[in-house]
Image (cartoon, grey):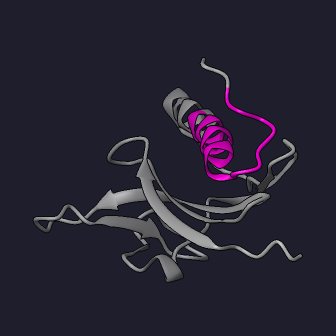
Amino acid sequence: MTDQPVTVLTEDILGEFGFRVVWSYSEYRAEVKAYHIASRGMDAANTPMFLREGYRASDDLVLDIEQAAVYLEGSLKGDGCSDLDQGAHHWCEEQDVIKHCLLLKYLWTRAHQLIPTSECRPRSN
């Protein structure tokens, strides 16, 4: 039996300038990509904008997630193991570091909610 992704889910988390998280998950594992929401459009929908892949300035933004820089990606397995490429981010404020830590906590919790065979149910706290 192969462990092919069977479901794709996209969620925006951690507030207006948080992250867009794209999941592909199956019975035993969850693949994840997270994109930092760097700005919001001036349209009525307040559309999220992302840093362009290979950006050199903070105003190099795109609307299309396919053109966006990946903030974090990897996989989490139902047995508790994970491989997450977290890059080398530049944080200017304590709040940026806290938001990164909240993202990691969210990914762990959400992955084990999505993986039906997870042996690692999240703890409260």
Query: Exactly how many numbered labels are in the figure?
Result: 0
Please tell me whether residue 103 is drawn above or below residue 50 in the rendered image. Answer: above
Of residues 56 and 78, the one nearer the viewer is: 78
Q: Which residues are magenta?
A: 102-122
Residue at image position (36%, 42%) is: 15
Q: Is residue 74 left or right of residue 79?
A: left
Assess whether residue 121 is covered by the magenta stretch: yes
Magenta span dominant secondary structure: helix
Residue 116 location in percent, x, y?
69, 51
Q: Is residue 28 left or right of residue 104?
A: right
Residue 83 location in percent, x, y?
84, 54
Of residues 42 and 30, the one nearer the viewer is: 30
Q: Identify the residue at the far left of this view.
A: 44
Q: Is residue 104 left or right of residue 94?
A: right
The image quarter containing residue 103 is: top right
Residue 84 location in percent, x, y?
78, 54
Residue at image position (60%, 39%) is: 100
From the image, which quarter does the N terminus lie in?
A: bottom right
